[in-house]
Image: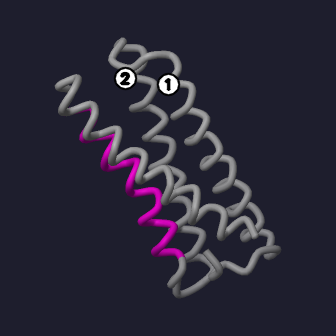
Amino acid sequence: MADSIISKLSMDFAIRIVKFYSYLTEEKKVFVLSKQLLRSGTSIGANVSEGTYAQSRADFINKMNIALKEASESEYWITLLYKSELIDQKTYDSLISDVKQIIGTLVKIINSTKKGKEQPFNV
């Protein structure tokens, strides 16, 4: 089910972002941008997790929308790091691929839930 996929995708991405944050701060000495990415990148999964205990379909959709906004913000920070030449093409491509997969999955979940096709509490 798409909902359980998003839990795994967002957790894997959060772990990757935590490790990437350590690299950026220790090796590259990039503190402000890396902190922004850490916050948004780990917030995706936190909101997906909150959706598990949503009080209603509307609450679930709201949590997934917040996760989607955080994923979009993460995409922005990753792109900014790349365009600022703080990360290489390979790293950029890999991170962007992951976050775009999360965005696509969240959009599908939100749209399906709005149409009543998905059970909203199986994240």
Q: Quadrant of residue 20?
A: top left
Q: At label 2, which amino acid type do we have?
A: Leu
Name the disc covering residue 81, or none.
2
Whole-percent x and y of residue 67? Answer: 50, 57
Q: At label 1, which amino acid type do we have?
A: Tyr
Whole-percent x and y of residue 16? Answer: 43, 46
Magenta: predominant secondary structure element?
A: helix
Report whether 108 appears left or right of 82: right
Q: Residue at x 62, y 40 (%)?
A: 100
Report whether 39 appears left or right of 58: left
Quadrant of image for the C terminus: bottom right
Q: Nearer the viewer, residue 24 or 105?
A: 24
Q: Earlier in the sequence, mark 2 or mark 1?
A: 2
Q: Residue at x 45, y 25 (%)?
A: 79
Whole-percent x and y of residue 121? Answer: 63, 82
Report if the CB atoms under discs 2 and 1 are less than 8 Å apart.
yes
Q: Name the residue that disc number 1 marks.
A: 92
Label 1 neighbour load within 10 Å: few <14, some 14-19, many 20+: some
Whole-percent x and y of residue 95? Answer: 51, 34
Range of magenta residues: 32-51
SS label for mark 2: helix
Alpha carbon distance from label 2 to label 1: 8 Å
Q: Residue at x 55, y 59 (%)?
A: 65
Report whether 123 appears left or right of 17: right
